[in-house]
Image (cartoon, helix red, strand yellow):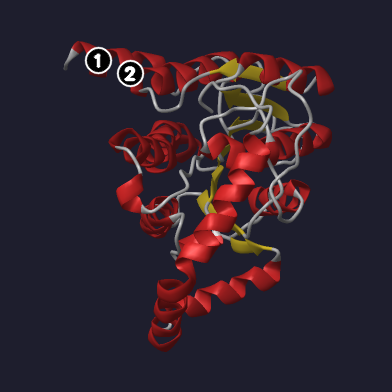
């Protein structure tokens, strides 16, 4: 066995003497919940919602000041600074959580990025970042928590997908394609975990009112930044409610937020898809210009560090 493999094996042993192991793994209020992308938006709202139920929450993000603010809001939230696109950092993160708490009952794969622009306008780094964050990190974190969950015969994995997984439109083609790939991962994982006690859920939000567009421009809002408008959309608390409901469900859940947004699935019907080809072929430029204007408006005043 290679040194790297041995290190991963050592970090992820299942027989960890965590201080919460005497509690019921599946009961709301006694779960250990790992939430990525917890410093803002959907991740932040989800972390707070789990903590208010009494769960022990480990919130993960790259930006330590925002994480400190989150931890200060509720004593049930513990934070870990981690770049989920770093393979070794993922191994060490899961290892630390298992060592401290003894198990991971719920994994909320929320961290995500989405560059705005036509594919030929993006950089190679943009493409690698969207797939590295939205697919590679998600698949690998899931891989790392599955042995613990399967070994106990209990666990929930909540994937934050998007209605963009059902209809890819400019100027977020790269982002949408990563969510198409995520849906494929979810479908296969549900079959792999059938009968194991591990449930895989998909939450597919419509546009949500967060600082996501600023982050798509590589400008991550930080504590103390001037106020700026959130992107148009539905409240992130709606998505957090759906995440909590999925994590407590006894069967795999696919849920659009709001529910009416599930109509976007009709885009997968060939005739509807052909109509959308015509619409966005003709008017995709207008949509792109509007989204770019929103990005510029939201990024104003945000720090220039990558998010």
Q: Which residue is mark 1?
A: 4
Q: Is residue 111 visible?
A: no
Judged left or right of residue 2, residue 9 is: right
Residue 190, quarter of the rendered image: bottom left
* Other-residue count near label 1 (Cα within 10 Å), few / some / many at <14 / 14–19 / ≥20: few
Q: Position of residue 17 (x, y in %)?
A: 55, 14
Please say if the residues under marks 2 and 1 sit with CB atoms less than 8 Å apart. yes
Q: Against 183, is 128 above or below?
A: above
Residue 90, quarter of the rendered image: top left
Residue at the spot 59% in from the left edge and 57% down from the top edge:
290
Q: Against 174, is 99 above or below?
A: above
Judged left or right of residue 209, residue 144 is: left
The dot on residue 200 is none
Quarter of the image where the C terminus is located: top right
Q: Marks 2/1: CA distance?
A: 6 Å
Q: Against 215, is 189 above or below?
A: below
Q: Position of residue 112 (x, y in %)?
A: 51, 40
Judged left or right of residue 18, residue 129 is: left
Residue at the spot 40% in from the left edge and 56% down from the top edge:
173
Closer-to-camera residue (278/154): 278
Q: Is residue 98 visible?
A: yes
Closer-to-camera residue (41/34): 41
Q: Position of residue 242 (x, y in %)?
A: 70, 54
Q: Which residue is mark 2?
A: 8
Residue 258, quarter of the rendered image: bottom right
Callout 1 secondary element: helix
Q: Position of residue 257 (x, y in %)?
A: 67, 61
* Other-residue count near label 2 (Cα within 10 Å), few / some / many at <14 / 14–19 / ≥20: some
Tell which residue pokes out farthest to the left in this image.
1
Residue at the spot 35% in from the left edge and 47% down from the top edge:
121
Closer-to-camera residue (175/155): 175
Callout 2 secondary element: helix
């Amino acid at each position: 066995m290679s040194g790297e493999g041995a290190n991963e094996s050592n970090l992820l042993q299942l027989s960890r003497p965590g201080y919460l192991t005497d509690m019921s793994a599946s009961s709301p209020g006694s779960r250990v919940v790992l939430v990525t992308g917890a410093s803002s938006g959907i991740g932040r709202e989800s972390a707070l919602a789990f903590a208010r139920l009494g769960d022990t929450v480990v919130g993960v993000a790259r930006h330590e000041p925002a994480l400190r603010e989150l931890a200060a809001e509720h004593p049930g939230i513990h934070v870990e600074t981690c770049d989920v696109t770093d393979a070794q950092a993922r191994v060490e993160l899961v290892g630390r959580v298992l060592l401290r708490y003894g198990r991971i009952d719920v994994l909320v794969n929320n961290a995500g990025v989405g560059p705005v622009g036509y594919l030929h306008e993006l950089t190679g780094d943009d493409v690698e970042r969207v797939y590295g964050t939205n697919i590679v990190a998600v698949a690998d974190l899931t891989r790392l928590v599955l042995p613990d969950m399967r070994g106990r015969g209990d666990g929930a994995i909540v994937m934050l997908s998007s209605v963009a997984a059902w209809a890819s439109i400019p100027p977020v083609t790269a982002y949408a394609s990563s969510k198409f790939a995520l849906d494929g991962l979810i479908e296969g994982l549900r079959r792999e975990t059938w009968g194991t006690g591990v449930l895989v859920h998909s939450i597919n939000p419509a546009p949500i009112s967060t600082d996501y567009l600023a982050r798509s421009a590589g400008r991550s809002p930080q504590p103390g930044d001037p106020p700026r408008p959130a992107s148009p959309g539905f409240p992130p608390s709606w998505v957090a409610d759906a995440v909590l409901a999925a994590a407590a469900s006894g069967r795999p859940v696919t849920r659009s937020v709001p529910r009416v947004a599930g109509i976007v699935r009709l885009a997968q019907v060939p005739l509807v898809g052909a109509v959308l080809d015509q619409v966005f072929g003709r008017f995709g430029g207008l949509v792109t210009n509007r989204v770019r204007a929103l990005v510029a408006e939201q990024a104003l005043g945000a720090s220039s560090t990558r998010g």
